[in-house]
Image: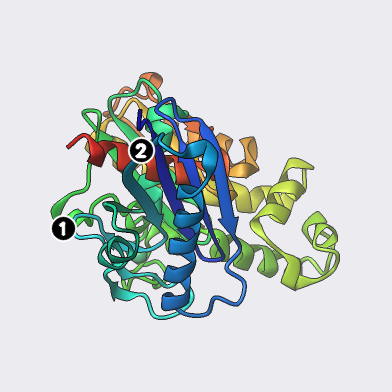
Amino acid sequence: MSDIFLGADLGGSHIAVAAVNRQGDIVDKVEDPLTRAEDQDEIIRRIIHCFQKMRRKRQLRGKLNPQVGIGVNGVTDMERGIVVFSPNLKGQWRNVPLKKNLEAALRIPVAVANDVRAFTLAESRFGAGRGATNMVGIAIGTGIGGGLIIDGKLHTGLDTRGAELGHVIIDYNGPRCGCGSYGCVEAMAAAPAITGMAIGRIRQSAGSTLMYEFAEGDLNRVSPEVVARAAAAGDLAALEIMNKVGMYIGVAIASLLAALCPERVVIGGGVARAGEVLFDPIRRTLKKWVHTAPLRKIDVVPAELGTDAGVIGAAVWAMDHAER
Ligand SMILES: [Zn+2]
């Protein structure tokens, strides 16, 4: 019985490794906040340590499948297991052969995925995407990531570089994006853009918006969460920002619906925790801009698995590899 899979999630400030069963339940988990891990070699050592710690647990002994998975924040070659580039991880993450390094240390097969592809796999198999044959996954946080399930399978595209949905262009006159392009939805609707809009509005309003109050008068504490709270409390400036963000994301989704016509769009990530103040303008935007896809039959829903989606998705990626 080796029906439990280890899945790891490597983010900018933390690593988690969970033992996940075939029903998608987490049966055990270890985490490392990566404090004082300043370069990629140290971070890789910590990943190895977390995996080893889990593999040594008595209650998991004999139940673990040797295949493990890891989801990484950054551009990832999922076929070869190479982290091509990751601006959010500490150190120099350019063409790091993560699969090779981990396999050499752990002596077990390791499958590497991009973290939002892992999120999409998890939501599709065990979360808000259950039962959908075609699904779009979007995670909105510091950046915007994506994943696509097409005909029930994760779509990776040429060189596994597909589904970078944060770089769907919504304004060709728009601001420069971190990827080098202009007007990507990530450049206009991810956390830094939202915070920037909020700081601008606070400065204009001479402190009369609730956003200023919720940030305790400190512009460094302005965040998408502050904007969402103020919007939910009826603050007009905050509502205007959330409407704009929802419209940007909605326009990106409208293009995806035209191209793919999925039956479900699952939206997660920290920014999506705003709830209805974000989902309402997204849905209104879709009504205005979607005319070919049968919008009535397409559900746009919040993710269900929360921050666990990453580890669960990495374990699903391992399960899929074990069965190849
Ligand atoms: Zn971009």
For the point 38% across and 53% down, which residue is it? 70
Query: Marks 1/2: CA distance?
Result: 21 Å
Quadrant hosting residue 81: bottom left
Q: Position of residue 255 (x, y in %)?
A: 31, 43
Give the side of residue 223 with respect to residue 314, left or right. right
Residue that mark 1 sits on: 159
In this view, the residue in front, 125 or 104, is 104
Question: Residue sitting at 80 percent across and 62 percent down?
Answer: 215
Image location (x, y in percent) of residue 303: 51, 35
Name the one closer to the observer, 243 or 82: 82
Q: Position of residue 56 (x, y in %)?
A: 49, 49
Say what secondary structure mark 1 lies in: helix
Percent across and percent down for residue 25 are: 50, 30
Counting residues from the N terminus, which is met first, the one under dot 1 or under dot 2? 1
Q: Quadrant of residue 312?
A: top left
Left or right: 225, with 104 as reference point: right
Q: Residue at x 39, y 53 (%)?
A: 71
Q: Which residue is mark 2?
A: 316
Q: Amino acid at mark 1?
A: Asp
Q: Is residue 143 visible?
A: yes
143, 306: nearer the viewer = 306
Q: Describe residue 243's horizontal placement relative to residue 179 as left or right.
A: right
- Badge 1 density bin: few <14, some 14–19, many ≥20, Cα 10 Å: few
Q: Quadrant of the N terminus?
A: top left
Q: Is residue 284 visible?
A: no
> Which residue is more in the foreground, 70 or 143?
70
- Which mark is in front, 1 or 2? 2
Tell me which residue sits at (75%, 71%) in the image: 219
